[in-house]
Image: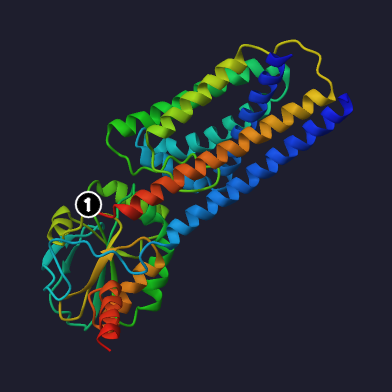
């Protein structure tokens, strides 16, 4: 029973995250293309296509995470996608480009890439891999679904709070060390 | 009893979610406050140049293959705003609308010149994406070093006589306008103006 609740909660949370991210990219695809160009990992001609492709992929994975039938495969896809983002940020951190905007904020705040973003993605990849293990069989009644919905929404709120704290951190750093 | 526990649990989930929303709103407000408590004037941190110094004269290449003379007396009697930026500077991007409106509103007396260094293709791509093609855009590492630019985005206002009028880190519209304000008041920065007012008040 507990495994089923955790699995459904994690899947819903990841689904919300990916759908929110896809929406954020789609609303301002122009800005996301600019972020991708700044990462300097792709040839310029491919950036528009990759930007649209990533937004669509996130949307598709977010939707596919909800039903149990497609959940395991979608979770594996999400882990690979998050791992790709992790590698892209890691490469640019190694290049010393710490002022680069991560382009990953759901709240459209500026967030220079840093170690916290790598840690965040590692945690999300771990959650995705756990979900990809498969949906435990358990009979859930209406109360179980209320618990799952409450937990998923709370996790999502926690995520955006942490995201805002990371954005505040970079603003504060600029404020106290302007040189 | 079971019914009470279920009701209690549902109400607790509602409370957790409401508190999550409130915490998010508070954290967002903190971020906005951090933005607001930044100095009203541009932060003037430059170890190379100071207001009143003659602006270094340089001929620097422009993005479209030409040359632009920076510094010196303006034959047209116009001031120049040098705005230093970089394609991977997030704050710079947020200031492009401000630059456009400043150029439009101050066109009677001011030329706005964008300045950067590094890969010309990256800057051309930035200019195209951000709608800055009509701006004068120069690329010169020497320009940045000569003007003591260490942090971006950075603004330097050169008056008609070729002297530094005001300079500083620009993070907002208010910072940019403070350069113009400092020039109008004949002070180095808004900070200096506030300090002189405070000193005058204490003398009284």
Residue A177 in view here: yes
Q: Nearer the viewer, residue B17 or A139?
A: B17
Neighbour tally class for label 1: few under 14, some 14-19, many 20 plus, Cα within 10 Å: some
Please state which of residues A51 and A143 is positioned toward the viewer in this rendering.
A143
Of the 4 image quadrants, the one containing the N terminus of chain B is top right
Picture quadrant of residue A95? top left
Check disc 1 and report the residue beneath it.
B117
| Residue B70: percent from left, percent from top | 16, 68
- Residue B188 relative to residue A174: left or right: left
Residue at position x 24%, y 82% from top? B186
Residue lying at 39% horizontally and 47% vertically, measured from the top left: A170
Q: Is residue A93 left or right of residue A54?
A: left
Residue B156 in view, yes or no: no
Residue B37 to residue A111: above or below: below
Left or right of B81 on screen, residue A54: right
With respect to residue A175, does A102 lie above or below?
above
Image coords of residue A51 (percent x, y):
49, 37
- Where's residue A68, x and y in %? 72, 18
**Whole-percent x and y of residue B165?**
21, 75
Disc 1 sits on a residue from what chain?
A: B
């Amino acid at each position: 029973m507990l495994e089923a609740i955790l699995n459904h909660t994690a899947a819903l949370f990841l689904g919300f995250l990916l759908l929110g991210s896809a929406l954020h990219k789609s609303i301002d695809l122009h800005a996301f293309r600019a972020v991708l160009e700044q990462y300097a990992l792709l040839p310029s001609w491919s950036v528009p296509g990759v930007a649209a492709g990533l937004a669509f992929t996130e949307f598709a994975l977010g939707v596919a995470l909800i039903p149990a039938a497609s959940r395991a495969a979608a979770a594996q896809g999400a882990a690979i996608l998050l791992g790709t983002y992790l590698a892209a940020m890691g490469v640019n951190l190694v290049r010393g480009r710490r002022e680069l905007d991560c382009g990953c904020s759901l709240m459209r705040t500026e967030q220079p890439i840093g170690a916290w973003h790598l840690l965040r993605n590692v945690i999300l990849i771990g959650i995705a891999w756990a979900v990809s293990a498969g949906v435990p069989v358990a009979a859930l009644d209406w109360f179980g679904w209320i618990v799952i919905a409450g937990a998923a929404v709370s996790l999502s709120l926690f995520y955006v709070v942490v995201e805002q704290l990371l954005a505040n951190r970079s603003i504060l750093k600029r404020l106290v060390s302007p040189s | 009893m079971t019914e009470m526990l279920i009701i209690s649990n549902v109400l607790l989930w509602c409370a957790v979610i409401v508190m999550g929303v409130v915490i998010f709103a508070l954290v967002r407000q903190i971020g906005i406050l951090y933005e607001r408590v930044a100095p009203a004037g541009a932060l003037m941190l430059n170890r190379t140049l100071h207001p009143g110094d003659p602006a270094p004269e340089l001929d620097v290449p422009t993005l479209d293959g030409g040359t632009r003379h920076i510094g010196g007396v303006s034959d047209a009697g116009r001031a120049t705003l040098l705005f230093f930026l970089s394609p991977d500077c997030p704050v710079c991007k947020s200031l492009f609308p401000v630059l456009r409106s400043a150029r439009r509103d101050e066109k009677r007396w001011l030329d706005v010149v964008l300045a950067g260094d590094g890969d010309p293709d990256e800057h051309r791509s930035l200019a195209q994406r951000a709608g800055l093609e009509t701006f004068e855009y120069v690329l010169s590492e020497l320009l940045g070093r000569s003007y003591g630019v260490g942090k971006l985005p950075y603004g330097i206002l050169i008056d008609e006589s070729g002297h530094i009028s005001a300079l500083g880190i620009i993070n907002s519209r208010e910072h940019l306008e403070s350069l113009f304000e400092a020039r109008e008041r004949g002070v180095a920065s808004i900070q200096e103006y506030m300090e002189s007012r405070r000193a005058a008040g204490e003398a009284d």
